[in-house]
Amino acid sequence: MALPVRISANQIGGLMAFQTIVEIEDPSQARVLVVALKAHGFHPLEGGEGGLPGVRGLFGPKGVPVQVPDEEAEDATVLALDLLKQMQSDAG
């Protein structure tokens, strides 16, 4: 089950700040969601872009975090939750 998570972050030193909009238990579902968000014009981080440099596959306690730039977070959250609802109804 995907849970919306709000993480406030500030822009520091010209770097873009990101927010985690959902955490997904299934890594495959997270990858599909990232591709779908990109197809809709959002700019989510790819797996391995966040966290520690050179350390891939670090997930939070609730699953794989899907992160988007702060300015996209509100709209991306609405779309992500709708897409996840559709994925879960198709799987069930």
Image (cartoon, grey):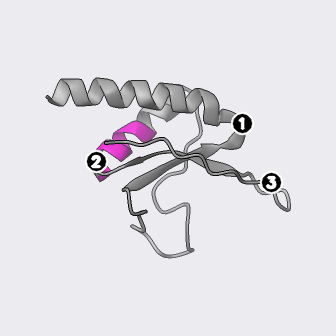
Q: Which residue is mark 3?
A: 11
Callout 2 amino acid: Ser
Indicate left or right for 60 with 84 as reference.
right
For mark 1, does the 10 Å Cα neighbourhood hold few (<14), some (14 to 19), or many (20 or more) residues?
few
Callout 1 amino acid: Glu
Q: Position of residue 66 (x, y in %)?
A: 48, 47
Q: Position of residue 22 (x, y in %)?
A: 46, 44
Q: Is residue 21 above or below residue 9?
A: above
Query: Which span is picked out in magenta?
Result: 27-34
Which label is found at residue 24? Answer: none
Mark found first going from the N terminus, 1 or 2:
2
Q: Which residue is mark 2?
A: 28
Q: Secondary structure at mark 1?
A: helix
Question: On the rendered image, what quadrant is the C terminus found in?
Answer: top left
Q: Position of residue 91 (x, y in %)?
A: 16, 30
Question: On the rendered image, what quadrant is the N terminus found in?
Answer: top left
Query: Image point 56% across, 31% down: which residue?
Result: 76
Indicate left or right for 35 with 76 as reference.
left
